[in-house]
Image (cartoon, rainbow, N blue to C red):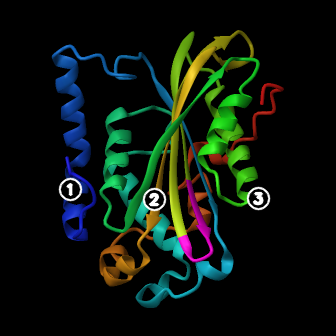
Amino acid sequence: MPQGRFENPDDWIEYCNTSYEKKQRKLQQKKRVGHIMRLAATEGSDQSSGQIAGVDDYYDKLDLGSLADFGRWSSVIITILNFAKNKAKFNPLDTKFDQAAFEAYKTQLNSCPFMFLEEHTSRKAHVDSHDFSKGVEAVIDLYSGIADKDINEVKTSIKKIAQLASQTNNQEQKQTCFNQSFVTSTSSEFKAYIVYSYVSMKRHAGKGYDSMSQELLTVRARFLIDKEKCKRYDSNIRGMDKKDVDDWCGSGDGGAAANNQNPNNCPGW
């Protein structure tokens, strides 16, 4: 596993080509020797993924240099994130949770030469089926510093993720990986956030799933985009499958399953 950020994009791309298989082998080895892995032994674990973006239109089009053909910085960033998702085999359009894919995706972002890991932190909150507000507050606290309009986008996305997670399957109980990815800008600085939590849920006859009472740990990684490095290695980025904000915030190729859900409007929010 890489220790920190790759300096050379070619080395990172080569690592990405095999990261999923390496994570898969590592998880299998731990299970064989009797390690208890969170989620790994959870029967039928699933995921609910959402993706949002909130960028300043002026700065989004400014100083693209050799990446001018992308039109916007958000398109450059989303293209890189989409590349990492695909190489990790992490599919936010799928509700089936693949732990190896999610771990590979996180590792690829941590080691990506086009961004710096600014901060990795977490928050704890107690939630139950009647009051999920403290869980939402913990997420909002992890996004401190972003614009009010973006906070509203985050809240709406959380409710969409919860709506998708509440839909029924064949289990009485399940553990769902709630995960949200957010591309945003503060003046000329562009950032990417990955926020996730594992939520235990229980089925109720006729109404789908509700969160069980639990101590919820929500984790957030915040990345600062290295725009100068993106411009220096434009050919590497241009070789990736180009995506933009519409793809990212949609529910088709490059999007996420929760993006097209109606927000969950239960009183507990």
Element at badge 2? strand
Q: Position of residue 3 (x, y in %)?
A: 22, 51
Compared across the picture, whether 241 is left or right of 30 comes to right
Task: Classify 10 Å Cα crowding around label 2: few (below 14), some (14-19), many (20 and above).
Answer: many
Element at badge 3? helix
CA gap, disc 1 to disc 3? 37 Å
What residue is at 63 percent from the left and 36 percent from the top? 138
CA gap, disc 2 to disc 3? 20 Å
State yes or no: residue 186 in magenta.
Answer: yes
Compared to 113, does 101 lie above or below? Answer: above
Q: What amino acid type should be assigned to the residue bearing mark 2? A: Phe
Can you tell which mark lies on residue 149?
3
Residue segment shown in magenta: 182-189
- The residue that label 2 is drawn on is 223
- The residue that label 1 is drawn on is 15
What residue is at 62 percent from the left and 40 percent from the top? 139
Q: Position of residue 51 (x, y in %)?
A: 58, 51
Q: What amino acid type should be assigned to the residue bearing mark 3? A: Lys
What predominant SS class does the magenta segment belong to? strand
What residue is at 24 percent from the left and 68 percent from the top? 7
Task: Classify 10 Å Cα crowding around label 3: few (below 14), some (14-19), many (20 and above).
Answer: few
Q: Earlier in the sequence, mark 2 or mark 3?
A: 3
Compared across the picture, whether 29 is left or right of 38 comes to left
